[in-house]
Image (tube, rainbow, N blue to C red):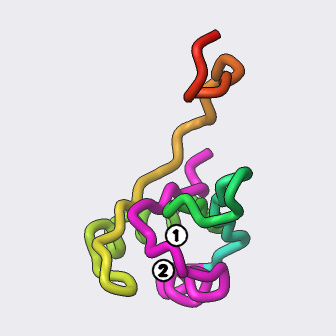
Amino acid sequence: NETRLFVGNLPFRTLDGELLDYFSQAGVVSSVQIVFDKATGRSRGFAFVEYTTSEDAHKAVEIFQGKDFQGRALTVNIARPREERPPQHDRGRPE
């Protein structure tokens, strides 16, 4: 999907609306999804931003890759498809 971007190195306090406003500079954003840790409820420091066209998404990569956002240099690229992963076990305990 060439319209969906991975946006990394986000400050943990970033809100959906702030990302929407910022990334709208490159085109029409159809959705913003900040990823949160299920256990703690805290941001994991990355998000997915989806545009209505692949042209806008590619333009956003050119504009925002490495740019400062709330004091951090963003990592922005076209999102790869989610990989199938084996179920995770408790990391702290031997099985």
Residue at image location 72% in from the left, 72% down from the top: 30
Q: Is 80 situated left or right of 16 in this image?
A: left
Q: Is residue 28 above or below residue 92?
A: below
Residue 52 appears in the figure: no
Q: Is residue 45 above or below residue 11?
A: above
Find residue 89 and report its horizontal and vertical position in percent: 67, 22
**Magenta segment includes 29:** no
Q: Label 2: state its secondary structure.
A: helix
**Magenta segment includes 10:** yes
Between 45 and 27, the one nearer to me in the picture: 45
Q: Earlier in the sequence, mark 1 or mark 2?
A: 2
Q: CA distance from mark 1 to mark 2?
A: 6 Å
Q: Is residue 25 above or below residue 90?
A: below
Q: Is 23 situated left or right of 82 in this image?
A: left
Residue at image location 41% in from the left, 69% down from the top: 59
Find residue 40 and report its horizontal and vertical position in percent: 68, 58
Question: Which amino acid does the dot numbered 2 rest on?
Answer: Ala
Find residue 2 and report its horizontal and vertical position in percent: 56, 49
> Residue 83, located in which quarter of the rendered image?
top right
Q: Is residue 66 above or below residue 87?
A: below
Residue to which mark 2 is pinned:
26
Question: Which amino acid does the dot numbered 1 rest on?
Answer: Asp
Residue to which mark 1 is pinned:
56
Q: State the extent of the magenta-drawn residues as a range.
A: 1-27
Residue 77 appears in the figure: yes
> Residue 13, located in which quarter of the rendered image?
bottom right
Residue at image location 59% in from the left, 65% down from the top: 43
Q: Quadrant of the C terminus?
A: top right
